[in-house]
Image: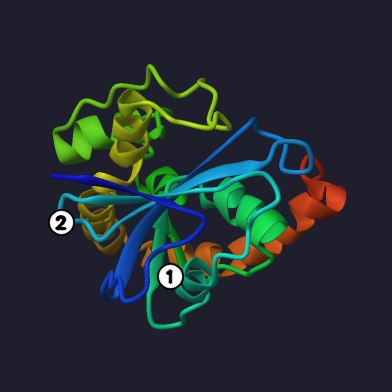
Amino acid sequence: MANYLYEGDLPDGLDFGDSVAIDSETMGLNPHRDRLCLVQLSDGNGDAHLVKFKQGAYAAPNLKALLTNPDVLKIFHFARFDVAVMKKYLGVDTSPVYCTKIASKLVRTYTDRHGLKDLCRELGGVSLDKQQQSSDWGADEISDAQKDYAASDVLYLHTVKAKLDTMLIREGRTHLAEAAFAFLPTRCDMDLAGYGEIDIFSH
């Protein structure tokens, strides 16, 4: 297993196959205030590819091409945040997407614990170390501990997705998950437009 760090974009010719696990690190949880600092990706085979951004430098043509490639499924955990952040800073609509948090909420109804750490422990048999979660991702240099943390957020998403897919099929809820995933880009647009805390479907 190796972590590869790039500045500003993915290298030419990097192939993730037909699905890629993606996560992001930012300066906080408000996309309008807290800039995108890092995007991490994995094809599920043990390596992680990390793209670090300097403030205001978001050209990243190779990454943008991947995010918008209709033939590559993008797997996230809590896609609502990452897709919104990437639209805000990279200016692209990420599609198609799969969200393990949504899938978990649809089928793991026996628990209210739907964090990535919980999913990896139950479905992947892996214990994640979240110590670096609240660290300075905007620093000029990120530490090896930060790289390992960022990588861990994508290395196991393919395995988790496979387990959740089996559960979705078993419980007859795959169609609900697919409809929710299709709606995610619109939900992100609503978040960026200021409707994040408003339920437009309520009375």
**How many numbered circles are shown?**
2
Task: Depth check: give the residue in front, 26 or 169.
Answer: 26
Q: Is the residue 168 above or below the residue 30 in the image?
A: below
Farthest bottom residue? 71
* Disc 2 crowd, CA 10 A, few/some/many (<14, 14-19, 20+): few
Image coords of residue 98 (percent x, y): 43, 61
Does residue 114 appear left or right of residue 118 in this picture? right
Inspect this view and state whether residue 187 appears.
no
Q: Is mark 1 on a helix, strand or loop?
A: helix
Image coords of residue 57 (percent x, y): 65, 54
Does residue 103 appear left or right of residue 125 in this picture? right
Q: Is the residue 138 above or below the residue 191 in the image?
A: above
Give me the residue at 78% from left, 52% from top: 192
Task: Depth check: give the residue in front, 144 or 192.
Answer: 144
Give me the residue at 13% from left, 44% from top: 1
What colouring does the structure picture have? rainbow
Give me the residue at 39% from left, 83% from top: 71
Image coords of residue 3 (percent x, y): 25, 44
Q: What residue type is labelled 1?
A: His
Q: Which amino acid does label 2 sit on?
A: Asn
Give the numbered dot on residue 45: 2
* Disc 1 crowd, CA 10 A, few/some/many (<14, 14-19, 20+): few
Q: Is mark 2 on a helix, strand or loop?
A: loop
Residue 162 sits in quarter: bottom left
Residue denoted by label 1: 175
Residue 115 sits in quarter: top left
Task: Depth check: give the residue in front, 123 or 174.
Answer: 123
Image coords of residue 198 (percent x, y): 82, 44
